[in-house]
Image (cartoon, coloured by chain):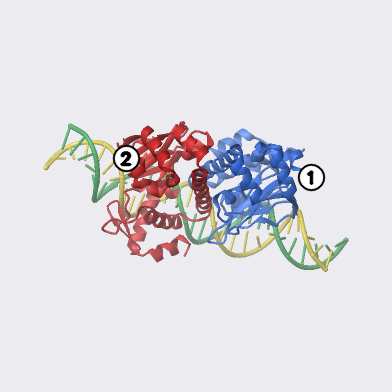
Chain colours: A red, B blue, C green, D yellow
Amino acid sequence: MSNCSHCIMKRFNALKTLTHDELERFSDHKTSLIIKKGENLMTEGNSINGLYCIQDGKCKLTKLNTNGKEQIIKFVKGGDILGHRSILSEEPVGLNATALEDMRVCFIPKGDILESIKDNPQFSLNLIKNISLQLSHANTAISQMAQKPVKDRLAETLLSLEEIFGVDNEDCIDVILTREEIANTIGTATESAIRLLSNLKKDGVIDLLGKKIKILNKNALKNISEGY
Amino acid sequence: MSNCSHCIMKRFNALKTLTHDELERFSDHKTSLIIKKGENLMTEGNSINGLYCIQDGKCKLTKLNTNGKEQIIKFVKGGDILGHRSILSEEPVGLNATALEDMRVCFIPKGDILESIKDNPQFSLNLIKNISLQLSHANTAISQMAQKPVKDRLAETLLSLEEIFGVDNEDCIDVILTREEIANTIGTATESAIRLLSNLKKDGVIDLLGKKIKILNKNALKNISEGY
DNA sequence: AAAAATAAATGATAATTGTCATATTTAGAA
DNA sequence: TTCTAAATATGACAATTATCATTTATTTTT
């Protein structure tokens, strides 16, 4: 089994402030697991007794609305951590984490996390900063959902997907989403999302290659996202 | 000047876990201030060097959109605290806090807060829980903004306003908001908010007495908020 | 108290977005 | 591969929501 001390993933998240001893303790107790595409890593309302550290693969964080519709709140990728909010607040998980592709994940038991929180103030502070940043993003999202038309939100989402996942060797945004998932991200009907994507393609702002999306004119998208 | 040890407001927030000595330290360094209706307690993008503890009065937390529209993110009242997110994350304030009526507020310098965070793990944990809860609410808000029609969001907002502020001696929701502020909460045009309020009154679900709103049929509102 | 400014209300109309129907394409299973 | 199911795409239309214009009511100022 791999060793947390040598894992490069911790460079990208709050775990980077842990001492060698703490990482060794994590290594001894952690379990590695494979989550298949479509499977849930966490489920809304369930309790969780540890922290997930994503090695590889992507997932979506979603919320099921009272009307049965799925809302995508956030995308998560290798290097990110999941479950710390629930551990810290001692509350059930608030979102579903569903794999968009096969994932490799490490699970570190709650006890070890709590011990490091107690002993290592810098670690707790990093977790807090992570949650604070999420809150800041969430507030921006509320504002945009409430005030911007669907077209602007789609443009914004495409830019943010490229920001998060980067591009592949053909300059396409490096994540595979269904049109329905795109619609559930921006909060609109699937048909509306499809139509607006087609329009953006017609205008030469993006290119559509199957499910792959390539941004051709980032400035134009930025303008659209701001209502011009 | 009043003494934090005897202040009943701390019962309602994270300050309740502070020791007598900590509260005495707060008392020695705190300043009390009056914020007039319409004035800003905090301003988006500014830095803040302390924590506000609301003694009395109500304010709105808002965000200015790229299109110049104001989005109300949250309402705050006596007993709530403000500014802890910014202190913990060491980032500028993310929202404007604007007084809806005259407010009495205590300001506790950052240094004292950080000292208590270091010495009193239960205090830090309570601050984290507060931020976590806000994140949880924000995620729910994203989902509702994205997926629910304006009418449902208005019903939801009226219920939540009564939940937050309670009712006065005439059973009206105990906060004065302009129609524009209601519109900026649910994310719609002022005229649309006015029209939908009129409809709810016509249907006997609420009563409108000037700016005061009285909920007549809570179940009906709940049903509307869920799309029925 | 009167005048002026602001807020609320409402109608008319336009723009946006959702729903339903259906065709076409793509992906997965036998 | 071939069949089948699912996803994508598009048109037609309906519902929702925004914008503009105007009137009425309420607040604020003088």
- Determine which residue is flagged by label 2: A104
Mark 2 Cα shell of 10 Å, populated few (<14), some (14-19), many (≥20): some
Q: Is residue B116 above or below residue A161?
A: above
Whole-percent x, y for residue B196 in the image? 60, 47
Disc 1: host chain: B
Circle 2 marks a residue in which chain? Answer: A
Label 1's element? loop
Q: How many labels does the image show?
A: 2
- Name the residue located 45 percent from the left edge and 58 percent from the top edge: A152
Q: Residues within 10 Å of mark 1 (few under 14, many from 20)?
A: few
Label 1 vs label 2: CA separation? 56 Å
> At label 1, which amino acid type do we have?
Ser
Which residue is at the front of the view, A167 or B161?
A167
Residue B156: x and y in percent read 58, 41
Task: Out of B30 and C22, give the one closest to the viewer.
Answer: B30
- Residue drawn at x 39%, y 41% as measured from the top left: A53
Q: Does any portion of residue B228 appear in the rendered image? A: no
Q: Name the residue under label 1.
A: B2
